[in-house]
Image (cartoon, grey):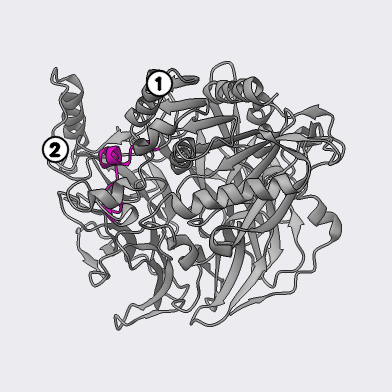
Amino acid sequence: MLRKSILLILISAVAGFSSVASAQEPITAESMWEMERVGNVTPSPDGTLIAFTRTSYNLDTDAAHTTIHLMNADGLDQRQFTQHGSESNPVFSPDSRYLAFTSRRAGGPAQLYVIPVYGGEAKQITDLPVAVSAPKWFPSGDKLAFSATVHPDYEGDWDKHEELIRSMRDTRVTARVTENRMYRHWDRWLTDGLYPRLFSTDLNGDVTDLMPDSRRHFAMMGAPSYDISPDGSEIAVSANSEPEPYEYLNYDIFLVNTDGSGVKENITTHNPANDLNPVYSPDGRYIMYGKQTRTDFYADNVRLVRYERSTGNREVLTEHIDMSFSNWIYSSNGRTIYFHAQDRAKTSLFSIPAGGGEVTEVFRAGTNGAPRVLGSNRLVFTHNNMSAPDEIYSIRTNGRDLQQLTRVNEDRLSNLALGEVKNVTYQGADGADVQMFIVYPPDFDDSKEYPLVMMIHGGPHGIFGDQFHYRWNSHLFAEPGYVVALPNFHGSSSFGQEFTESIHGAHADKPFRDVMKAADFMIERGYVDENRMAAAGGSYGGYLVSWIAGHTNRFAALVNHAGVYNIMGQFASDVTAHRVAAYSGAPWDGLESMLEWNPAMFAENFETPMLVIHGEQDFRVPVLQGLEVYGVYKGKGLDARLVYYPDENHWILRPNNSIFWYKELHDWFERYLK
């Protein structure tokens, strides 16, 4: 059972999470990209300082500029600490006197630097032909660990590594050859034979390969997940244990000796599913890690497991808790675990006793990330919501005394007119409660009628959370004068495992009914014009848009971004292992069942105008999906428009491409909704 802690938060602080009342200008894609992005929040071990990064974008060049900033633990004395503009991954030394970070300088790959916190020049530690990432200090403070991706045959000789890479680069043969089931991921090919490894270096740059001969993938997206034991003798890292041909990737916890011997031990061989994010207890007695139990369901709940190093005994602490744990950390005394988890369309902070027990909600509002222990009794973390991007906050571990530490975008937000956001619940498919956010245009008047834009999230096992979204910003959708609905339909995460699993085998059934009932709910409010409604979705949301096209003409316009159109084609996706369970069939077995929920089978019913957007580098939903539905539309003589990006993946990430994306979106809505 979830027990909420008492939150004594000033009304004025809570009001700060809402839209700013003194707004003057409409939000635009340009004004959104002019906001700075706060990240990499890292407190010093002595609890006196906080390091963080600030990233801004140059709209003339699309270039990002990232610098490290420091502030006192109470948010005072904020100052820029680095100047170059390519810094990231700040980490304090155990004595809090030095800051290590990575930086790209002189046009080369990112390298490791160390700088005194209280004055002095940065010293470059590594000088490698490969990029360095994810640095961590050893508890002794005399060396650091880091990750780098290397050619596995370099044998510790960096000159040989350069020759191997040069031969790969200079060959006139461009073919990629594989016999693996998984041979590319997201937007990169895995056929080049490069693998990540963990290394250590002393402060003079003497580098040791801690995983010689390793050919294991770490996290395919984001930083590698590893931790160093308190005595510095061992590193626990989450890495793939599934051999080629990679029927699926199975992340296990490996214990790696830090002496460079290459000795390692897999402590989770018993679990065929993923084991993630190992974290040592402060006394070194335990390793806390996350465990999934299914190999065919990427959104399977992550349970907390406590592994005792001396005995090998392990205990699942959270099997009874219907929640998926993420980003857990120990308290300074080792008695409590803090973590964040999605919960009812928000991402909240929680705690649980280190030995298991009752979960306590520490803070619930918007989307909170990357909690870190600050001193003996506070947490520092990032917070954002639908109406404000990330800022840094701290709170006592008992949920009291919330403090906003940064106000990086406060002036920018004060000049923007943002509409009201409401959190509602309606009756969806089979009478189930379905949560939904509604975003209103500025100066909304409920006595008038407005066009409705239905936003449909991807996944499908994800959410439209209370989150400031740069790629699908709900206020940018609403600004031209539209009411925007964001239903978290069946299959969405954060509402319990059963709700998330409920669409398996019938991907379109309940979500489609939920969306239609959401439209009915909005029309019943009296301020939505049912003749001027649009639906827009990306990835799985694009799949549901194509399904909508074949099953209703209630919408005046559709937007399909990187959407699945023909689920047969998803066997060309980068990840295919879970699709048989999700689709309740495969081309070689259960084809009829699979095609029952295939939007491509209902093309004869298409009539609603569709905007199709897709990137060539999208390996999650291959670009043919977008080209095929566009070709079918044009073949039928229907209104359709294609926006094709040759240099984008599943997401539109370049600032000017994003600005153009929003322009195409607004122009399409303008054509059919005004």
Residue corresponding to mark 1:
636
Q: Quadrant of residue 348?
A: bottom right
Please report whichever mark, 2 or 1, sits nearer to the chain's N-terminal start: 2
Counting other residues with Cα less than 10 Å from the Cα at mark 1, is it few (<14), some (14-19), or many (20 or more)? few
Type of amino acid at the residue the image marks with label 2: Thr
Residue shown at the point (28%, 37%) measured from the top left: 569
Q: Which SS class for mark 1?
A: loop
Is residue 74 shown above or below 107?
below
Q: Nearer the viewer, residue 149 or 69?
A: 149
Q: Quadrant of residue 571?
A: top left
Q: Is residue 153 left or right of residue 225?
A: left
Task: Report, in whole angstroms, how far the alpha carbon at label 2 lies from the one at label 1.
Answer: 38 Å
Q: Which SS class for mark 2?
A: loop
Q: Nearer the viewer, residue 560 or 463?
A: 560
Q: Is residue 81 left or right of residue 640?
A: right
Residue shown at the point (56%, 33%) measured from the top left: 66
Residue corresponding to mark 2:
178
**Quadrant of image for the N terminus:** bottom right
